[in-house]
Amino acid sequence: MTSSSSSSTSSPDLLSSVDHFDHLPDSIVLLIFNKLFDVKTLGRCYVVSKRFQTLIPQAENVVVRVDCVISDDDVTPNSISGESRVGTFASLFNFVVTGIVKPIQALGSHILGNPSRLSSLRSANESEAAVVGVTHHSPTQVLRNFNEIKFLKIELPSGELGIESDVLLKWRAEFGSTLSSCVILGASSVEKRGESESSSSTEYVSEDGDGSIPDSFYTDGGLKLRVVWTISSLIAASARHYLLQPIIEEHKTLDKLVLSDLDGQGLLSMNKEQLEELRVKPLSASSASKRTLVPALNMRLWYAPCLVLPDGSVLKGATLVAIRPSSDVEGKEEVVDGNLVASVFDEPYGSAARMLVKRRTYSLEMNSF
């Protein structure tokens, strides 16, 4: 009796000490890791066991959320000069648009952060960085321990373009070895209105009938402002593309690469064919700064003085620009697919793009820079 009782009481304890996770096959554990995405979370899991240390480098889906990004040309953290990098971006920007309008905030400061912030972030993340054996500043180094990545998303803390809080500016770009396409949606202001106000405003939206741009657009600086939006968005996109080159070169298994920001301002994407194109045909770098050279461009522009969206938002000075390399459209009569253009933006801005492409189209050209 005593022996039997002792056996029955020890059995549950024995069962509770069994780690059932150890009995899961590697394929299931890898599936779990692929659902985690976040590289910091994967880094914490890495120190749990030797088995995890073997499996985590095989993760296929990885998201890197960074506080700042530096080029791999900057070998050591101490070599980072925020002022010099900002100066590089600023000099190019001023070269392109000086005399048009007051320059927007320099791109470089948003990509890098300031040196003191870099130092504090380095201290705060030192132990976490040690988990994956890298400094936290270079995405290339962070990803070096992964050898099977198929989907990679890198997320910046904010958009590079410093704009007023009520101004809308969003861009979506695709790259191969150079720019494949870019769509920019902007508005001088975004307002929220009640349902009744929105209904009454609809008449105002269509009062110019054929969608022609009013003369005031050219005389009050409206066109110049849109040129600044376009150039600065292209600079931001080409700077992001430049930063991705060493990652693409090192990770041959990549099928999809996305570089976005928490503000939802800009999104650069590359599919499998575009990634392979960059490996075969290296990018052409701009001589003015660390970014990919932007080719000569053909642009389509649509404008509405006031646009009321289905959710009640009102865009003042709404502008859509669809951009392709001139070499891709030369000698062709390009028809813009409104649904395709709209699909690159989340709602309600997809609806805005869809409404704008129904209006009169204006064509522009831009030289390589």
Image: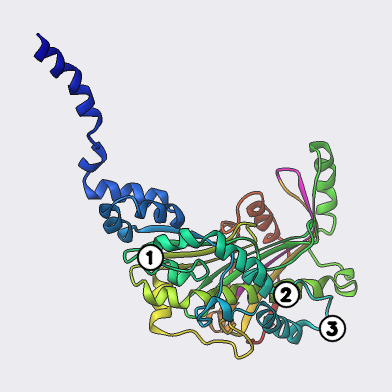
Task: Please report the residue visible at 44 percent of the width from the left and 68 percent of the height from the top.
Answer: 134
In the displayed structure, would residue 104 be above or below residue 164? below
Say whether marks 1 and 3 touch (CB < 8 Å): no
Q: Position of residue 234 (x, y in %)?
A: 64, 75
Q: Position of residue 239 (x, y in %)?
A: 59, 76
In the displayed structure, would residue 14 be above or below residue 167? above
Mark 2 or 1: in front is: 2
Q: Residue 99 got which mark?
A: 3
Q: Which of pointers 1 and 3 lies earlier in the amino acid sequence?
A: 3
Q: Main secondary structure of the magenta part?
A: strand
Q: Is residue 191 left or right of residue 66?
A: right
Q: Residues within 10 Å of mark 2 (few under 14, many from 20)?
A: many
Viewer-proximal residue among 288 and 131 = 131
Task: Please report the residue visible at 26 percent of the width from the left and 54 percent of the height from the top.
Answer: 50
As for residue 319 lying within the magenta part, the answer is: yes
Q: Which residues are magenta?
A: 310-323
Q: Residue 255 got which mark?
A: 1
Q: Which residue is mark 2?
A: 106
